[in-house]
Amino acid sequence: MKFSISRDALLKPLNLVAGVVERRQTLPVLSNVMLVLEGSQLSLTGTDLEVELVGRVPVDEAGIDGEVTVPARKLVDICKSLPEGSDIAFSVEESKATVRSGRSRFTLSTLPAREFPSVEEGIGTQQFSLKQGQLKRLIDRTSFAMAQQDVRYYLNGMLLEIRQEQLRVVATDGHRLAMCTFPEALSGQQDTQVILPRKGVLELARLLLAENEEIGITLGSNHLRATTGEFTFTSKLVDGKFPDYERVLPRSAEKVVVGARLDLRQAFTRTAILSNEKYRGVRLKLSEDSLDIVANNPEQETAEEQVPVEYRGDGLEIGFNVSYLLDVLGVLSGETVKLSLSDPNSSALLEEAEDGDSLYVVMPMRL
Amino acid sequence: MPEDSSETPRKIIHIDMDAFFASVEQRDNPALRGKPIAVGGSAERGVVAAASYEARVFGVRSAMPSVTARRRCPQLIFVPPRFEAYRAVSRQIHDIFRRFTSVIEPLSLDEAYLDVSEDLQSVGSATRIAQLIRQQILEETGLTASAGVSYNKFIAKIASDQNKPDGLCVVRPEQGPAFVAGLPIRRFHGVGPRTAERMARLGIHTGADLRAQELELLREHFGKSADYLYRASRGIDFRPVRSERIRKSIGGERTYREDLLTDEALRSALTAIIDLVWERIERQAARGRTVTLKLKYSDFHQITRARSLPGAISGRGEFARLADELLEGVLPVPRGVRLLGLTLSGLEARTPSDAAQNVAEAPPRQAHFEF
């Protein structure tokens, strides 16, 4: 195996692929990246057995086809520390890989490519495509609400649902829920629900850099595959049933408050400073056209904010984890935000005041 | 706005009987009425347990050595205490408290905090409840009580002292900070003569002076009490009224008419104290792991010796053995011993609810979806 490539061309896919590779692996080959040269195309593959990423890049000068695996982190560090604009000559002889650039020369250990596991492919049941920017929006709008290491393993990921030709993603950790619906219809698609695991979601989001380019999605019974010209991303799916999220969408939240998103966000950010560091509780006191936000901490320090809002109706006092509210206000866009409440024990619904594609439900905190 | 954590301010009443022991004696013995009396031993080593208001005019105070009291008020009448009578009255007033609330924290026989937020009788106002309690105490026991009504324990207690005797003082949440600001520093619970002196050197004489201090400075000078002082000076006190007081220790001691000198006399005296204290431990069903022996010499020099076990003491035998060992460790004594005492501490919380009450504030509870 032999080829040469510019450092910068190699570094881009290498960085993405190495991101999938876990630093601590039980199986030594999993800390390696697999390089496969076929003609002038170099593929780089990293995997953690749950998520696999293949990056593709043309080489400048193709020598001998072949395949090999080398330590991912070391190869990244070497390429990164070589000067920008330099060229790299890569070759494998016997069981050593050699990286040459200018007066530098590195010899890396290798493991045979046949030992490199591939994420098994099921048969793709349906395919559709959308713009990378559109997929990124769906993820960015919801992924913060995914659970982390929850025993309810099906919450440690994101629901991807097609229903009546409508694509929707939903994430929840049991305390708050985020939902974003793709505005265009996916014609001809069957109804389906899959759960993409947390790591898969976060890795996929990193890849979606070419906003206006298409990305093809293949859904299998056990896998989701996302393909562009530059990479193929494959993730196992979470084998479980996502909870019936529609049941937790508030139905009777009749106290509707409309406020300036940035004003609210800033007011919450400031009150958060003096909220209990552990529980992060803030008290919202709603009255006609005014929302008071109060926080205090165990040191008895207090923060109070008064935010003018549009509201007609009875007063209400309700507590929330301020981080949950800030997460939502951080991903919403638009000048105004709509907050719908009913009573101190019921959830709040947050959304853009007009034409939103996203819905957020936050459960209250009893302070 | 009250500076309090709960949405609606709590309603706390502190009830304190007026010159309790002395008043009971005057009630039961008409000959003592209108006269300066002191409950307690008149003997050389006695102390005043309670003084009637007539005696207080002369400067007689509780905990004062009887000798001093007699010097201040030669016509002072000493009355031996009748604890059974005081306990009976205490039961009566607790019956009255329970008509209005179940949240009662007794501080002693004649003093208690009541959280009347729940208002069992739907009286509607804490002030009115306090008036009713005082009225019913007078009708049913013939004794007067003073009450402080406020939104926390700290202020309620100071308030009950404000218009004593037979008085009532209400400090509303919005008045709290100003009320505290005007208090001389000595009125703060826990600020004794020495702390007050140290505060005076820092220019702190009133609640307002205290409030003006940075928490850091308070920590530097008053250590563990700093946070309490910082909050108290702002009229803040989150301590709940605890229906059952959590005891930190159980103990007892005896002062002897004649100093004990020989090992034999000390050993036999200790046996009596072991019996006395163990009976108290049994009554409380307490489990503790540290036994402390206290010994006061004829020159008032006091020593303590303690031993702890890894776990709770198993029974009277072990308690007695530890006490004996502690005493053997100080024998022979260099001087006569006038007082011996034993304490069991390191007590275990008896029930989970007791332990829970140690937490001053319940943590916030995040609601979750019912999937």
Image (spheres, coloured by chain):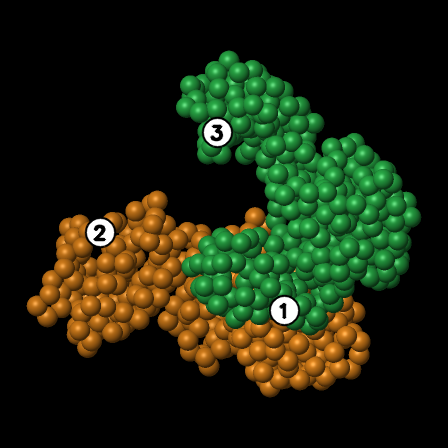
Element assignment for label 3? strand
- The subunit letter for the residue under badge 3 reads B
Q: Nearer the viewer, residue B317 or A190?
A: B317
Give the spatial CA distance, label 1 vs label 2. 80 Å
Q: Nearer the viewer, residue A330 or A16?
A: A330
Q: Is there one chain holding both mark 1 and mark 2?
A: no
Q: Nearer the viewer, mark 1 or mark 2?
A: 1
Residue at label 2? A110
- Which amino acid, mark 2? Thr
Tell me the quarter of the picture where residue A314 sits: bottom right
- Which amino acid, mark 1? Gly
Residue at label 3? B297
Residue at label 1? B182
**Which residue is rendered at x = 26% and y = 69% of the image?**
A10
Residue B164 point in image, percent of width and height: 75, 57
Q: Nearer the viewer, residue A92 or A110?
A: A110
Note the chain letter of the orange one.
Answer: A
